[in-house]
Amino acid sequence: MTAKSKHFASEAEMCAAFVSEIGPDWTSYAETAGWDILLVRNADGFQIGVEAKLRLNAQVLTQALERSHEGFGPDCRAVLVPNGAGGGLETIAQHCGLTVLRIHSHENYRGTKTVGFFPALPRSAEGSLWGGDWHESCPTKRCPLPDYVPDVVPGRPAPVQLTNWKIAALKVTALIELTGLVTRADFKALGMDARRWITPGYDWLRPEGGAFVAGDRMPNFSEQHPDVYAKVKADAPVWLPKVRPNAYPELFTSPAAAPAQAAE
């Protein structure tokens, strides 16, 4: 009995299947720089911006062509679709310098699933055979990457994104958890505007003893990004002294701990 093709129920399911097959030479940044998936080749930083769609259409081709982030761009641009969902637009995509990534999922009579995609991701430029599958756009600058790999699901409608602002917000959350408070100087050191956090009516933070503590309406940023938040806290000995230059990171081991000043 032969294997039968299985259609993807959603773009998120298709993206998850694709990411599971990219291999160890690439890192997947979900919902980054405007792309559903921004692939980064670990060896040299080469980038592929990927837009995902269950059927190739003019809208997604336009999105992939126009997608930019403050003048930055990836080395190659691609559209991920289920195998057989490209239609006659694949030829147009190729002439526009876009790669159509065709992904398939098959299931045999025992229920075992196999996933694969074509064309293969480009190897390092040295000794690599590019053929006609990939088209370098030669950006002036590559897309900026967040300090942490996003722990979000690509391909979802209205996705949660891990932006630089969100990483700074996670550090504010960590400061409150580890030291019990956050100050205006902390916000300045993190490059954030404190007004959104302390404006009456928002109640994200409330004043206490010349500083601020968590308010009743403070968003649960740590719940939105639990994996990244754990890494942010683990990295506190690195980034926290830069925010509070005279602080001793080893003292910040409990919510009750207060910021310490270095001895003269």
Image (tube, rainbow, N blue to C red):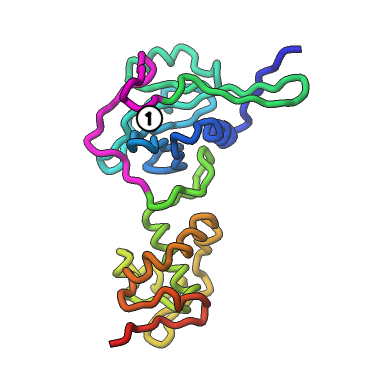
At 40% from the left and 21% from the top, the residue drawn is 99
Quarter of the image for residue 201 reads: bottom left
Task: Give the image location of residue 254, x and y in percent.
Answer: 52, 77
| Residue stretch in magenta | 122-145
Q: Is residue 202 visible?
A: no
| Between 82 and 146, the one nearer to me in the picture | 146
Q: Residue furthest toward the front?
A: 127
* Side (left or right) of 44 relative to 23: left
Q: Is residue 133 magenta?
A: yes
At 43% from the left and 15% from the top, the residue drawn is 90
Q: Answer above or below: position of 232 versus 135.
A: below
Q: Answer above or below: position of 158 versus 79.
A: below
Task: Give the image location of residue 260, x and y in percent.
Answer: 39, 83
| Between 65 and 262, the one nearer to me in the picture | 262
At 70% from the left and 16% from the top, the residue drawn is 3
Q: Is residue 233 visible?
A: yes
Overall secondary structure of the magenta section: loop
Task: Give the image location of residue 264, x and y in percent.
Answer: 27, 87
At 39% from the left and 26% from the top, the residue drawn is 123
Question: In this figure, which residue is indicated by the disc labeled 1?
Answer: 64
Mark 1 neighbour class, 10 Å CA radius: few under 14, some 14 to 19, many 20 or more: many
Task: Give the image location of residue 151, x and y in percent.
Answer: 51, 49
